[in-house]
Amino acid sequence: TFTWLKTFCSRPPNETADTGLPAELMLMVMQPGGPGIPQCNARSPTLFTINTWLVCSLLANIFVAIIFPFCKRVPLRYQMKVKVIARNPDDYVRETKLDIQRVPRNYDPSLHPFEVSREYTRALNATKLERVFAKPFVASLDGHRDGVNCMAKHAKSLSTLLSGSCDGEVKVWNLSKHECVRTLQAHEGFVRGMVVRYCGTSFFTVGDDKTIKQWKMESPGYGEEEEPINTILGKTVYTGLDHHQNDPVFATCGQQVDIWDEQRSSPIRSFTWGVDSFSSVHFNPVETELLASCASDRSIVLYDMRESTPLKKVIMTMRSNTLSWNPMEAYYFTCANEDYNLYTYDMRYLAKPITVHMDHVSAVLDVDYAPTGKEFVSASFDKTIRIFAKDGGHSREVYHTKRMQHVICIKWSADNKYILSGSDEMNIRLWKANAAEKLGVLAPREREAANYSQKLKEKFQHHPQIRRIARHRHLPKTIYHQTKELRVMKEARRRKYANVRKHSKPGSVPVVSEKEKHVVTVVK
Amino acid sequence: MASPGEASVDETHVGKKKKLPARYWQELQEEERKDENKVKSDGEQSKEALQQEEDKTQKAKKRKQDQSPSDGEKVKPEKSDPFPGPAPIPEDRLQKFKRKDKLKKPHRKQHKLRDIIARSEDASEMAQKQAARFDLLLPEEAGFLEGDEDEDTCMISQEDIAEAVDITSGAKYFNLKLSQFGPYRLDYSKTGRHLLLGGRRGHVACIDWASKQLMCEINVMESVNDVKWLHTEAMYAVAQKKWLYIYDSNGIELHCIRKFNDVLRMQFLPYHFLLATASATSFLQYLDVSVGKEVAAICTKTGRLDVMCQNPHNAIIHLGHANGTVTLWSPNQKEALVKMLCHQGGVRSVAVDKTGTYMVTSGMDKKLKVYDVRTFKPLKSYFLPAGAACLSLSQRGLLSAATGDVVQVYKDVCSMPVTKPYMAHRLRGTVWGLHFCPFEDVLGVGHGDGFTSMLVPGAGEPNFDGLDANPYRSAKQRQEWEVKALMEKIQPDLISLDPTELAQVDQATWEQRHQDRVEVLGFDPLAKEKFVPKYKKKGRSSAGAIERRKKQVAHEEQRDVIRKSVEDKMKMEKERKERERKKAALSTQKSALDRFKK
């Protein structure tokens, strides 16, 4: 009988496979006839399972029976338990050259010091790189022989764009090839408005020659004449046109707002409200029976197609040129005003705009929402295009080139990636909606990296250095100086008003917020 | 915790009264319940969550029962999920990944902010949970050493440990007998793969110590004060008798930096790419090794600087001085950030742990003291009969202290009172340098008779992060890492006592912001313009008239304030009077009982 302890080493590379532990050398001490499973350590209670135990005891018996008599007596000190870190390099390096390298991770924060500073540095680098890669201009489409006056997106095809110019010519463009696929002389004088039918098979144009014309989308076959499907001769000049979202109904504006059925040659409904000229009319894309128009008496009028009278109107201090409905939030629309600002209104509460968007230094001529409804783009007489967040008071981006003149019309593409601008100097320009975005298909890792840096930029956006870099834009000298001048003027006006308040009887001069300042009245 | 296993047993009362066969998890759950009782206080939340989960499942079950058994048939209880809901995560593991306390919810009016905060908190909580879950999958476990019941682990010799462990681990205990160029300083690279030895008499060698391959060996023919690896194992710095030199791993001299003279000790800040040097002329200098520029040179005016360490948590340099003080330095300030009087005699050695919580110092007064460097308060004080000359803290918080030719390793020095060392080892010569090898259970000791690599089970972090410091990285991976690390080099001006300062909201006072604005603009935008009276004709701009007009507007604001305060005072006075009048009226009113008064 053995009253003292047996000692042995076991190297269980395969035996421990069932315990899920890596192969390692353990020194174990056991007593014969002792408890079944030796508790090695509290941290690894499953180290030895029954199988291993059996193997061990078998080994121990062999050891005791055969080897033990020849061994020298093991000193008592061997009763310790010890484990040191022993890694098998095979677990950490790749097996063959064709594999990718193994990267074991440990997310313990104490192994990653300076978390915040490193993230900040990454965010700073990402912001700088964004500025480096910000090249928004993609292409210029030339071919018109006069200024581009209106544009229309195709309802079904992303790569098709229609444009009408000041000499009555309409061109159909293939955007992916940057080329004109069709040209037609639609009107005499300006093409004032253009819209593609919701099915995408035909489009309508209105012009200075008092006609509304409907055209086929396909070009005529060989030998055929370029002729409209339908022509309506009106009494007055039409200045704008929009089509219903899913009914064969369209609206025109001129001296009054007319609603037309496609099958008829006279309007099914006409709206007037003491005004004699409207500049644009737009259907609400969500609440499809509603429409809004901008009138020359500085008012914006809302209509319901089903009713015989207009709903209400808001009169502002200056005239609005055009407006655009938010495609996601049915209540909101943004109008482009002559007073250099854009105003986002809630249709229900016209008394004051939700947001005033400032930054342009000249009249704003056109505005169009992104399909996401989160941003919109505006074109201005100051030869720039600006992108605003729907609730941002100032623009996040400004696009300009040396050659681009007054921008007359603007469209945001239906895939949310591009912006199209038509300007006075006969060109249509294609811009990226996100200036630093990489075009084309992204590899998964590329996309991940882009998302990560985007998040970092967001996280540290308020740090002064990052904000300075992210906000920096080069502006043409004239615009830069005009901005400054406007700021001075605004400040002077503010100061003057403050002085007036100070020197008047308390309460007689009220505080008027910037939002309230521009609305004269709301009429119902 | 309502254990799901039990629940299923309870439900069987509807059908047969047969006991379900025992399952291994039931035992586990009982154990768990015991654990739960133990940690009831902190495990409350998860418990509640589980309870809710349970309720939900029961509700669902009820619904099902309501729907189906209309024909009076007895339904068999469905097999319930023995582990409903997501697997519970131990609280301590969650705590490990916690960065911040939850923010106070802003007012309901600020619904946008509320929404943003709620969403970001959800995201961070999920990340924390996932990280905690992932912790389970880490492949390696930390080492340990346990003696028999009445055996001290400090009595176990290195030979025994080396014999007991596997061959590769056993080979990590070795001695290099280098008696000729005597006492050695040493440094391990950040991955722990490479060892750099610098002998006092000029012998410099770098070794891939795990494979025992000599990378280079030179003699600089000059005294060597200290050696330090730079960011990779391709370059190292040697503080020689006069100047600082930088060599590559082949032993070729890359730079001799004459701006850095008489350097005694060096520290490398890996995330900032800064080499901090302390010189005999009491200069603390910072060298940016990525661009080769001196970032800061600080004259500490405290004499010879031969005790130095860095706080790996916030990159602050700690210097020990002969007068018993320890000073904390950053490159952004010419003065010490903190001065602490730690010992009666001079400070012999300083070490700071990985989390930047504890600082251990030893002094000529033969004391070993532990401080909390976040609050600068002493925690523990030990008396070592011989005093400790060198100190080093390992990744898992073991402290090694060299007293003469004996190296002692202590466990849990910072948190518990310690009476006995965890391990001890006697060497041939006096210890000159001590360093724990990162990610290994190894302590390197440089001494008068060469170098000894000791096995200290439980010293190193078992699981490394492959993107940060990977001991098994290939040359290509190293190159990639180097580029990435250089890209996110932290600027030296971000070094501060609190490394998370950058993420906190800067709540500058209005005065501070105004002052900044004035500094940026070059003038004070809110300053009141001086009133200049207009020139008027017909003799109305005589000196007297001007003065009169000036007087009209002088102290306008002050006058406003005074007027307002006077008005307020009048109002209050009026109110007071009114109140008194009412009181008086009340008091003068005759009550019905007044007639009985005499």
Image (spheres, rainbow, N blue to C red):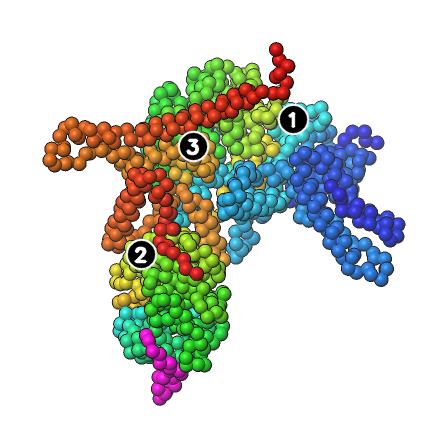
- Closer to us: mark 2 or mark 1? 2
Q: In this view, does B349 lie above or below A327?
A: above
Residue type at the position of mark 3: Ser
Query: Residue at (37%, 64%) from the top-left corner?
Result: A294
Rounded to the nearest angstrom, the CA distance separating label 2 from label 1 is: 85 Å
Q: How many labels does the image show?
A: 3
Question: Quick check: A382 left or right of B503?
Answer: left
The reply to whether residue A1 is in sight is: yes
What residue would you read off at disc 3? B496
Residues A376 and B378: in front is A376
Which residues lie in the magenta part?
A217-237
Main SS class of the magenta portion in the image: loop
SS at circle 2: loop
Verify whether residue A224 appears in magenta: yes
Residue B384 spot, x, y in % from top left: 56, 17
Q: Which residue lies furthest to the left in this view?
A: B538
SS at circle 3: loop
Q: Residue B153 carries which label?
A: 1
Q: Mark 3 lies on which chain?
A: B
Q: In this view, does A66 lie above or below A318?
A: above
- Closer to us: mark 3 or mark 2? 2
SS at circle 1: helix
Rounded to the nearest angstrom, the CA distance separating label 1 from label 3 is: 40 Å
What residue would you read off at disc 2? A339
Rounded to the nearest angstrom, the CA distance separating label 3 from label 2 is: 50 Å
Residue A187 spot, x, y in % from top left: 31, 78
